[in-house]
Amino acid sequence: MKRRLFPTTLLAGALAAALASPAVWAQGEIRIAHVYSKTGPLEAYGKQTQTGLMMGLDYATGGTMQVAGKKIVVIEKDDQGKPDLGKSLLAAAYNDDKADIAIGPTSSGVALAMLPVAEESKKILLVEPAVADSITGDKWNKYIFRTGRNSSQDAISNAVALDKAGVSVATLAQDYAFGRDGVKAFKDALKTAKIIHEEYLPTTTTDFTAGAQRLIDKLKDQPGRKVIFIIWAGAGNPFKIADMDLKRYGIEIATGGNILPAMAAYKNFPGMEGATYYYFGIPKNPVNEWLVANHYKQFKAPPDFFTAGGMSAAIAVVEALKKTQGDAATNKLMATMEGMSFETPKGRMTFRKDDHQAMQSMYHFKIKADPAFAWGVPELVREIKPEEMNVPIRNKR
């Protein structure tokens, strides 16, 4: 009698183990890993992305958190802004957590470390919000899609405000992928303005005096309009260089969009021009109206720069899953996402087939100092549509 029971007991145990294993319990689920800087130098960006992602999933599924009867499960991973950690967390998400798709990361350096993991695992990594051109350029593989803007989109749209005859530009950027790819793309985008000097500083810089002095020395004797163009992310306030009396030399500062706390510094530069992919008051569309209204309701504050990005990534994933009737098989999703258009708070976006970069509008702005706001308010000059930007394809597909 005992002999007969023993195999049955084993079978019951095996069945219980199988039911507890991800392979079985994931069948009625769509598992999304979000690998991002929950802590570390870019945590302010990461937290906004996570908020936007969850709001976007809520919006795109009509509040059900389901697609085709399958429950969406989000697995959070904190890469702390460290490339090696991001790489191992993504591998764990695909292999141990059985994630169907991953979103993230915050840092371009982390993203570049993660790209080969997506290829080895044959799973999609939807990059949001890391910016470096190389992610969809020479380091790209077919499993990489990006809803975040790239360096070229930033650069080409910002060049619109600065690329005029007789303008001399010096750049101030962080010495890593985001800064260097940004400057390269900006240089490529300028047709008439001249780049006089490139200044790269460590990402941890808090004292900008020496770098600013080098910028001033290179620019001060140039004829015509003189501009320092800043490409900076995370901690440190490069706008402190304005304290070095740039006006005495006729030097202006220009930059792109940023999170609202960083844009407090913009208030000191009324009339400053640049371009951004999002400011809550600019895009006029139903998705952005929903985001602004619901964000105010939940947080008593407007949605920020990276909130819109996180929401856009969520919408892209859900729209693709709706088209596949909830089938999260990588090949099905990839075929669906290539060339797919979707509506986001930033406006309509389209994954181009060549490099899976989402084409999106950028917004040329001029800063207004409004006493009602703690930050410099970017007022819309004009929308720069994707077809106007001629964003280069930099991969070797």
Image (cartoon, grey):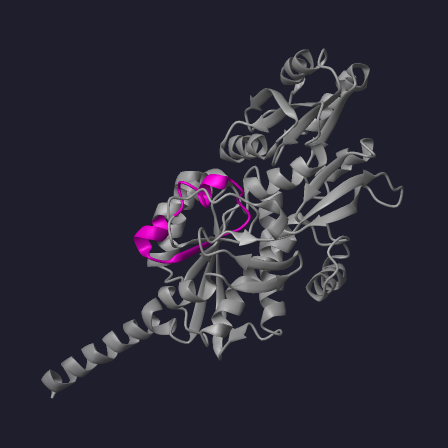
Q: Is residue 71 above or below residue 54?
A: below
Q: Residue drawn at (49%, 61%), measured in percent from left and top?
A: 339
Q: Residue drawn at (78%, 47%), measured in percent from left and top?
A: 380
Give percent across and percent down for residue 139.
39, 42
Relative placement, left or right, of 331 versus 341 is left
In the current view of this chain or complex, which residue is farthest to the right? 371
Give percent across and percent down for residue 342.
58, 64
Relative placement, left or right, of 271 versus 206 is right
Q: Is residue 50 above or below residue 67?
A: above
Q: Camera-side residue: 95 or 215?
A: 215
Q: Disc count in the image?
A: 0
Tell me if I can see residue 48 in this picture: no
The segment highlighted magenta reads: 117-140
**Residue 272 highlighted magenta (yes or no):** no
Q: Is residue 197 above or below residue 279?
A: above
Tell me if I can see residue 28 in this picture: yes
Q: Residue drawn at (63%, 17%), measured in percent from left and top?
A: 211
Q: Residue drawn at (62%, 73%), measured in percent from left and top?
A: 63
The N terminus is located in which quarter? bottom left
Q: Camera-side residue: 192 or 259?
A: 192
Q: Is residue 319 above or below residue 249?
A: below
**Residue 136 highlighted magenta (yes or no):** yes
Q: Camera-side residue: 339 or 276?
A: 339
Give percent across and percent down for residue 231.
62, 32
Give percent across and percent down for residue 358.
54, 54
